[in-house]
Amino acid sequence: MEFKEVVLDGNDALKAVRQRGLHELFLHLAKTSGDRVLLRSGANLLYLCARPADVKSIFASGHRNHRKPLNDIMGDGLFSVSSSPQHKETRQAIQPVYSNSKIREISHLIAAPLRRYLAEQFVRGEAVDSESLFEAAKKSCVYINTIAMFGLDVPPAIVAAVSEMHRGMTDGFFNGVGVEGILADPTFSGAKQAIHDHIATVVARHVATEGAYVPLVVELAQTLKDNEVGHADLNGEVLSLLGSGLETAGASIFWALYELARHPQEQERLHGWITTSDVAASEFSLRRDTPVAEVILETLRLYPSGWAMYRQMMEQVELEPGIEIPAGARVCVSPYVTHRIERQWAEPERFLPSRFADSAEVAQAYAQYRFFPFAGGHHRCIGERLALMSIGMVLSEFVCQYRIALCAPGELATQNKLCLEPLGRVEFKLTTRAQ
C-alpha cells in the first residue's frame, strides 16, 4: 500500500479536527485514509506511519537513520543524541545501571517517603480538580526520580531545580520560543547549572558503605569510567533521565487514576489484589502478570507517554518492495494512533485492563509493534523500568490510601504537549480507606 497524500491547506474539515490537537488529526487520518499518509501543509511534508510493520522498520531497521534536536538543551545523553556512532557503545555500558535489581532497590528506598508524601498531598473528603491532581502526579515523579538519582538526602533546592528545569523546557517548546529561547531563560539555565553542580558534588563526596544505597548518578559515573566511555556526558545522561521521565510518568499516573475513578469496579479489583497479594510491592509493575501492570499497560495504550515520535531520516528506508521513505524526510510514528485503531485492537477506545492479562500476548504485542509506549529497537527507552516502577508505586500506594471517584459525571479530552495532558476540568472526591 502506497502513501496516500492528504493536503491540509484549504481543507476546513481537517482543520476543524486539527483544532482538537495533532494527535486527533493523526488518528482521524489513520481511520479515514489508512496506515500510510503523506501529510502536506504548504511546503512541509510529513510521513505518518501507523502500520506496526512500518513502525518496526523505522525503529529497528532504520535505527541509525534519525536525529533528535534536544542535545543543545540537555547535553549528550541517550535520549537527546540518537544518531551518533557512539550511541550503541554508551547504551551497552550503562544499561546494567537500570537493571531490575537496581529498580527493586529504589522501590524499597522510596516506599516509606512516598507514603508520607502522598498523605501530605491530600485531605480526606476534599474535592480535587483535574489540574491539581495532574500537578500532584508530576510532583510525585519528581520526588521519586530525584531520590533515585541523588539519594534520600537530596536537598529540597535540587528537587525544585529539577521541576524548574523541566517546566522551562516544556513551556519553552510549547510557547514557541525554541531552543535558543529556552537556553536564554535565566530560570532554566540557573536550574540546569544547579543540577550540574550537584552531580559533581554527589559523585565527588560519595563514600561506599556496605548495605547503603548507591545513588544512580554515582553508578552512572563509575560505569562510564570503568567502561572507558570517554565520549559520554554524565551531565547529559542525568538530564536525559530527569528531563524525559518526569512529566510523562506523571501523566500516566494521572490518566490511570482518572480511568479508575470512571471504572470503580476496576479500582476495587486492583485494591483487593494489592491488599491481599503476597507479591512484593517492588514487583507490582516490573512483572507483567499482575493487575497493577495490567492497569498501567492499558493506561499507556490509551494515553502513551510519548504520544508521537518524530524522526528525520538520514538515509532512505524501504518499508516493503517499491515503498520507500526518502532520505531527509520527516516521519512520525504515533503510539496514540496505532494503539487506538480497530485494525490493531478490539474496542480500542474502551478501558479494559484485562486485555493485558496474558503475558505471552503482551510480549507479542511489543514484538509486533502494535504496542510501543516506550519506542522500540535500539532506542527503546532505557529508563522504562524506572518509569514503570514509579507509576506502579504511586498508583498502588494511592489506591491503598484512597478511594477516588468523580464528583459528577464528566469526561476529559486530551491535549498534546510533551505528553497528553487533560483538557477540560472535572473534580474528584478522595475517601480515605480503612487501614
Image: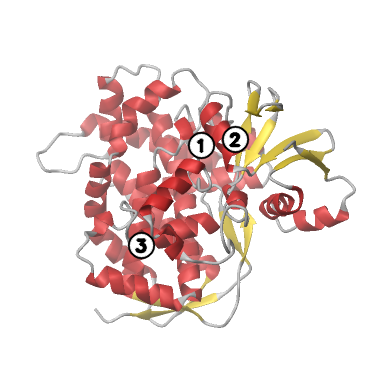
Q: Where in the figure is residue 309, as x and y percent of width and height? A: 59, 40
Q: State the separation of the CA atoms marked 1 and 2.
A: 7 Å
Pointer 3 and pointer 2: residues touching (CB < 8 Å)?
no
Q: Tell me which residue sits at (60%, 56%) in the image.
A: 340
- Give the SS element for disc 1: helix
Q: Where in the figure is residue 370, as x and y percent of width and height? A: 53, 47
Of pointers 3 and 2, the one earlier in the residue sequence: 2
**Residue that numbered label 2 is attached to:** 184
Instruction: Name the amino acid, label 3.
Output: Val
Q: State the separation of the CA atoms marked 3 and 2.
A: 42 Å
Q: Tell me which residue sits at (60%, 72%) in the image.
A: 411
Q: Tell me which residue sits at (19%, 64%) in the image.
A: 278
Q: Where in the figure is residue 74, as x and y percent of width and height? A: 49, 33
Q: Tell me the quadrant of the picture where the C terminus can be found.
A: bottom left
Of pointers 3 and 1, the one earlier in the residue sequence: 1
Pointer 1 and pointer 2: residues touching (CB < 8 Å)?
yes
Q: Tell me the quadrant of the picture where the N terminus can be found.
A: top right
Colour scheme of the picture: secondary structure
Q: State the separation of the CA atoms marked 3 and 1.
A: 38 Å
**In this view, 51 is above or below 80:** below
> Any mark on residue 292, and which?
3
Of pointers 1 and 2, the one earlier in the residue sequence: 2
- Give the SS element for disc 3: helix
The residue carrying pointer 2 sits among few (fewer than 14), some (14 to 19) or many (20 or more) residues within 10 Å by Cα, namely few
**In this view, 167 is above or below 61:** below
Instruction: Name the amino acid, label 1.
Output: Ser
